[in-house]
Amino acid sequence: MRVEVDADKCIGSGACVIACPEVFSQDEGGVVILLESAPAPAQHEQVREAARACPAEVITLVDE
Ligand code: SF4
């Protein structure tokens, strides 16, 4: 799995960080920071939950 985020469209809700803090963080302005673009298989379900939870739909998952 590869993770992409469109930070320009992030509205800073923090839902992704709540769902998967190992992969997503936020800067001081609340904008998403991608910590890991190729998360380990054990994190995939949490990452999928983060993508579902994002209200701005800016998290894209690419299955490889
Ligand atoms: S859930 Fe979406 S809108 Fe909220 S901080 Fe994460 S990427 Fe940004």
Image: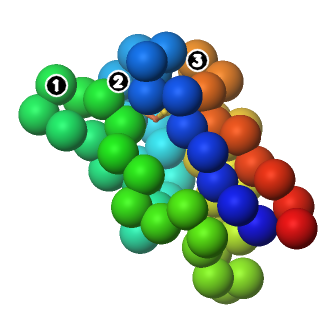
- Spot occupied by residue 30 in the image (x, y as percentages of width and height): 24, 29
Label annotation for residue 2: none
Count of numbered tags: 3
For marks 1 and 2, the one nearer the N-term is 2
| Above-or-below relation of 8 to 54 | above
For marks 3 and 2, the one nearer the N-term is 2
Q: State the SS at label 3.
A: loop
Classify residue 59 by image quadrant. Answer: top right
Q: Mark 3: few, some, or many residues within 10 Å (few <14, many ≥20)?
A: some
Instruction: Find out whether the residues at labels 1 and 2 contact each other: C-beta distance under 8 Å.
Output: yes
Q: Is residue 25 left or right of residue 60?
A: left
Q: Residue 29 versus residue 2: which sits nearer the camera? A: 2
Q: Amino acid at mark 2?
A: Gly
Q: Residue at x 46, y 37 (%)?
A: 15
Q: Residue at x 59, y 20 (%)?
A: 55
- Spot occupied by residue 8 in the image (x, y as percentages of width and height): 43, 18
Query: Mark 3 — residue?
Result: 56
Query: Mark 2 — residue?
Result: 12
Q: Amino acid at mark 3?
A: Ala
Mark 2 residue's CB less than 8 Å from ligand 1: yes
| Above-or-below relation of 64 to 56 | below
Answer whether residue 61 is visible to the viewer in this image: yes
Q: Amino acid at mark 1?
A: Gly
- Spot occupied by residue 32 in the image (x, y as percentages of width and height): 37, 37
Q: State the SS at label 1.
A: loop
Classify residue 56 by image quadrant. Answer: top right
Q: Residue at x 63, y 63 (%)?
A: 46
- Spot occupied by residue 51 in the image (x, y as percentages of width and height): 67, 41
Query: Mark 1 — residue?
Result: 29
Q: Mark 3 and mark 1: span between their CA atoms?
A: 16 Å
